[in-house]
Amino acid sequence: MGAVMPKNAIFNGGLSYDLTSSRLVRLWLGLELLLILISFILLFFMPEAAGWLFLVVFCAVLLTLGAGVFLFVRYSLIPVVKDKRTYITERSKILKKVSKTKTEISKIKKTLATNQINENQEIAKALQKIHKEYIETGLTGEKIETGNISGVGPKLKEKLKANGIISAADIGLNIQNLEGFGKAKVQALLNWKESVLSQLESTKPDKLPDIQLSEIQQRYKRQRDNLTKTRESHQLRQTECGLELEAVNRNLSRFTGVNFINYLRTNLFGGINNRFSQSASAAILMSVIGLGVLIYGAFGIISSRALLVASVPAPTLTSTITHTPTQIPTSTVTVSPSSTITSTITLTPSITRTPTEDLSFYNVSDCLPKNTLFQKGTVVQIVDGDTIQVRLEDGNTYRVRYIGVDAPESERPYYTESKKANSDLVLNKEIILVKDVSETDQFDRLLRYVIVKNIFVNLELVKMGFAVAETYPPDVACADTFSAIQNVTRGSQIGIWIATQTPEPSFAQVVIISVNKSAEYVDIKNVGNIDVNLGDWKLVSEKGNQSCSLSGTINVGVTLRIWAGTAQGAGYGCGFGTSIWNNSESDPAVLYNAQGVEVSRK
């Protein structure tokens, strides 16, 4: 229809606009209109034409209508049904994988709990065994012969020895059957044994030997480590399944509102001519089809009559046929010429994003450390896209830096949008702060993961395209999860990823803060949170196109003065023998990184 369209574009309710099918449908429509025109000429202006001509046109109309039905089924109904079934089957498979993964994670959690219980039970049993052996050894070592037993003299001790009763371990109720041992003597022996036992109980060891305890603990720890790795693998798989499920659901949503008229309109008008509403398109198309059917019926009657006439031999008698013309009303179809319309498809990024609170299909919170510090507080101020001011429950206020993500700094693209997204998520809301390894960064800001209601804020900013995943060891518990989400966001071209996909956006760690043309120097500052290597960076005078190659490292928070000539005092000298800045005209200073990407200008 005049505009060059991509091979496969999406229009009108998610239908695929394919050039091949579109051209075939338009060819069919043109042929159908041509046959209708020929039919009108034959019916109303050439009624005496040869019967074979009517028969040919009749067959052509029939074949054209059949071809139209075939095109509609081939390029509309079959692909839509097939694609939809494919996505439904794929979604079913993903849901089964998600369910299976959840079951495996649940089993691992139960096994981990059982592992800890088994470890404690084994340590307790080992300690009981040591206690038993200690008491048995002590009782056996305590000899009656040397014991101080009230009322039991050497003769009685000799008698006990003769009966095999040598130590405290041998004393039992059976001694009352011995001759010469009355009730008092028996009780004295039992009391002595009880005192020995009591002393042993008070001196028995209260823990296992270090080697034995360490062996048990290490054995169970290895089991727990293996289980934990397996669980993390399942959790990552669960996250990937969730992202796949989102993609499938998006594809299925394309089929919402797909119908016969939408398909025709898309292929006939390319989905780009807004002057044709869906109802108008339906009226035009149904009119063409209706005329075709009427012509088909008329040709059926006329062609049949023509064939019958042709098959009857000519009569020998000449008959005079008086023809009385009948006035046939004619309908005039006026088609207003339509102007050529050039379509411009503008992809406008959506800045305001609604956070997704339902994260059930991938439990991103599973990456958070478990045995760590949890704090509650209220956000009282938004500093930027990855930093907030929080009042904790103790009443003190702290500045908190999000772990694992980096948002645009001030004066950089998407700084305002990133800060607003952060504000919409957490400002004046109660949050939970989760510590990883580090307590604070070099600026004494608390390093935390942030949760508000059911939203993992660090991850949500990456998912919305207002922050990038950055790894700052040793705080890396959720690094893999952030990276996986970022890959999907980048592929969807959301937020900071709209303009370009490669190279990755580089938020200006280093910016130009002042230019003194008369003194011939430029001040640059590292406003980021990591030191920057200036090797192969360039500072350019745009008007004169003079370029100064930089080197060295600029530390966080440091301002570096770059002189056009020789450095005066502290700073960096470019070595130009003459002035390079134009004082009478606009001559911006432009800073390029090692990849040749402009990072700042002033």
Image (cartoon, grey):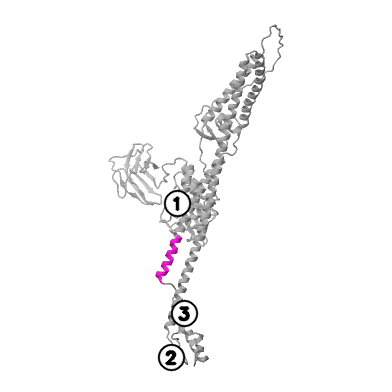
Amino acid type assigned to the residue bearing label 3 in the image: Glu
Residue assigned mark 2: 158
Q: Callout 3: 10 Å neighbours few (<14), some, many (20+)?
A: some
10 Å crowding of disc 2: few (<14), some (14-19), many (20+): some
Q: Please tell me whether residue 588 is drawn above or below residue 233 in the rendered image.
A: above
Question: Mark 3 sits on what residue?
Answer: 201
Answer with mark 3 or mark 1, whichever residue precedes in sequence: 3
> Going 50% across and 63% down the picture, which residue do you hit?
114
Q: Is residue 203 visible to the viewer in this orientation of the structure?
A: no
* Residue in the foreground of this view, choosing between 562 and 237: 237
**On screen, residue 331 above or below 16:** above
Q: Earlier in the sequence, mark 3 or mark 2?
A: 2
Above/below status of 192 relative to 280: below
* Callout 3 touching callout 2 (CB < 8 Å): no
Q: Quadrant of the C terminus?
A: top left
Q: Position of residue 279 (x, y in %)?
A: 63, 31
* Magenta stretch holds residue 242: no
Q: Main secondary structure of the magenta part?
A: helix
In this rendering, the label closer to the viewer, 3 or 2: 2
| Residue 575 horizontal/vertical position (percent) | 28, 43
Give the mark nearest the N terminus, 2 or 1. 2
Q: For mark 1, does the 10 Å Cα neighbourhood hold few (<14), some (14 to 19), or many (20 or more) residues?
A: some
Q: Which residue is mark 1?
A: 480
Of the residues shown, which amino acid type is indicated by label 1? Asp
* Alpha-carbon span between mark 3 and mark 1: 54 Å
SS label for mark 3: helix
Magenta residues span 209-224
In the rendered image, residue 286, in percent from the top left (x then y), is placed at 63, 28
